[in-house]
Amino acid sequence: MKYGGNTSCIQIELDGTDELIVADCGTGFRNLGNELTSNGHHLQGKIFITHPHWDHLQGFPFFKPFYNSNNAFKVFMPPQDEAGCKEILQGHLSNTFFPVSIDMLESELDCMTFEKGTLNFDSYSVEYMWANHTVPTAIYKFNIGSHVVIFAPDNELPIDNEDHSAFLNEFKAFVKGADVLIHDAQFTREQHKDRLGWGHSDWETVIDVTKDLGISHLVLTHHDPDHCDEVLDRINLEVAEYASDSYQTVGLVKEGQELNLS
């Protein structure tokens, strides 16, 4: 109830524009849609999906702005072997799984496969590196003026650094100096030892890898479903002590949390 039971969805708001920018469409995406609909705005925006696992797409069919013909969205997803963004979403929104197909959504919806590279928009750009996960998964970097926000909800930072030095070096270079790093921290290190290869990190390793990289705000996400608020409260205290003064702020993300960058 305190840290939240919804799966991944974040919104980035930029000064001077009403464009909607969202990363991932977990169950939190439904709540966002309800909030936006209640404001009565006509919406246009861009949605960046890290990968098509259910917990990152569950909210997609329940996003009310998709059912308004005045709205327009572009949806980006990295390629999944032979399948692109539209094929993946058509599969999720097929008659087998849901009564509404993607072609029945009333808003303008462009599904775009995001190949490696940089997408440049009016006031920001987006690029990604591949995460260490069980399917092709993006770690998104949003370059917004002088600010950098990185979203890595599903990424396994290995405990054994020697066998993964190339990946770790790439990761460190990619996130170095970020204003905000939102990173997977599902496990404790003790739990992680029994879950190697699951595609998720432990919070201790996240701090060990990033504490000297000049990151301002470290936001730990993708909480273990079996960790209740009491457990997460205890971990949050341990995180603060373990991280010492390595970041301006550090802690476990909570439902509805906002972080403002001046």
Image: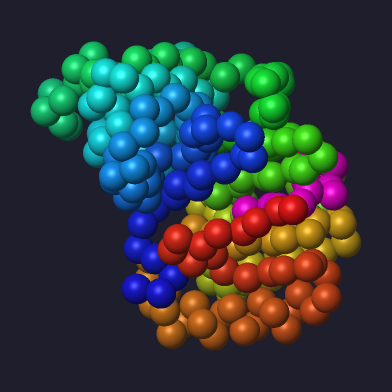
Using the image, determine if residue 140 lies above or below residue 28.
Answer: above
Front residue of 136/85: it is 85
Using the image, determine if residue 52 lies above or below residue 200.
Answer: above
Tell whether 193 sits left or right of 225: right
Tell whether 138 sits left or right of 23: right
Tell whether 55 sits left or right of 11: left
Front residue of 162/137: it is 137
Q: State which region is magenta.
A: 173-182
Where does the N terminus fall, quadrant-wise? bottom left
| Res 157 → quadrant | bottom right
Q: Is residue 234 visible?
A: yes
Would you say residue 129 sits in the magenta stretch? no
Image location of residue 87, percent across then percent down: 36, 16
Image location of residue 35, percent across then percent down: 34, 48
Tell whether 160 sits left or right of 229: right
Would you say residue 177 sits in the magenta stretch? yes
Image location of residue 79, percent across then percent down: 52, 20
Image location of residue 199, percent across then percent down: 54, 49
Using the image, determine if residue 151 lies above or below residue 72.
Answer: below
Using the image, determine if residue 44 lies above or below residue 168.
Answer: above
Residue at 62% x, 84% y: name it: 237
Q: Is residue 140 visible?
A: no
Instruction: Please give the count of numbered marks on the rendered protein.
Output: 0
Q: How is the image coloured?
A: rainbow
Residue at 42% x, 33% y: name it: 52
